[in-house]
Amino acid sequence: MFHVVDDTDSVREVVIAMLKHHGYETISFGCPKDYISFVSSPGFSKPIAVFTDVTMPAMTGYEMMAIVSELRSELRFVVMTAEPEIRSEHATKACMYLAKPFTLASLLKVVGSLIQCHASSPSDEHGCSSVDNRQQFPIENWSCPHRCEDCSSDCS
């Protein structure tokens, strides 16, 4: 299961359709505050990852990730953004980055890596640092926020 948080209906619907077409269950939210409420609710079910936009009214995706991470530190985030760069203070908040507009192939490549991370023990073999569009953003010294501190593995 994946969660999608994006205030733009068309983007959210395309991501959901792509994921559902390939057999993945999704839950979507048009507002980060609604997602935060859901994360705190008894009906919450942990996703493989949360795909989130950055620029949204009332709260940015980064602000939402910070709040949600306080509640559920184990959640993985994929940032979907058309912003040309990621500020250094936000560079390590997400597991992966997708530049908008993205292709079905790039989305599925990210999903495949996330599923490997979810299904197995931490391993550099998942290639998280090279599977997404991170090269398009000037992000230096990135490491997976779920990286094991005692090992060299991404995607715990």
Image (tube, helix red, strand yellow):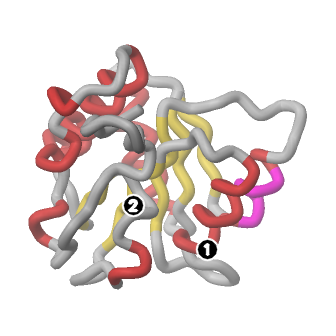
Q: Residue at x 70, y 28 (%)?
A: 45
Q: Position of residue 149 (x, y in %)?
A: 41, 44
- Whether residue 81 sits left or right of residue 140 in the image: it is right
State the residue in front, 151 or 82.
151
For the magenta stretch, what is the residue range?
33-37
Q: Residue at x 20, y 42 (%)?
A: 104
Q: Is residue 109 above or below residue 59?
A: above
Kind of residue sitting beneath label 2: Val
Q: Residue at x 38, y 64 (%)?
A: 92
Q: Is residue 21 above or below residue 37?
A: above
Label 2, label 1: how far apart the Cα atoms are? 12 Å
Q: Which quarter of the rendering shows the C terminus?
A: top left
- Residue 34 magenta-drawn? yes
State the count of labels.
Answer: 2
Mark 2 lies on a secondary structure that is strand
Q: Is residue 124 above or below residue 90?
A: above
Q: Position of residue 62 (x, y in %)?
A: 53, 72
Identify the residue at the far right of this view.
Answer: 42
Instruction: State the residue position of label 2.
Output: 79
Q: Residue at x 19, y 32 (%)?
A: 124
Instruction: State the residue position of label 1.
Output: 63
Mark 1 lies on a secondary structure that is helix
Badge 2 or badge 1: first in the primary sequence: 1
Answer few, some or many: residues within 10 Å of disc 2's Cα (few below 14, many 20 plus, some between 14 and 19): many
Name the chief secondary structure element in magenta. Answer: helix
Residue 151 in which image quadrant: top left
- Residue 124 magenta-drawn? no
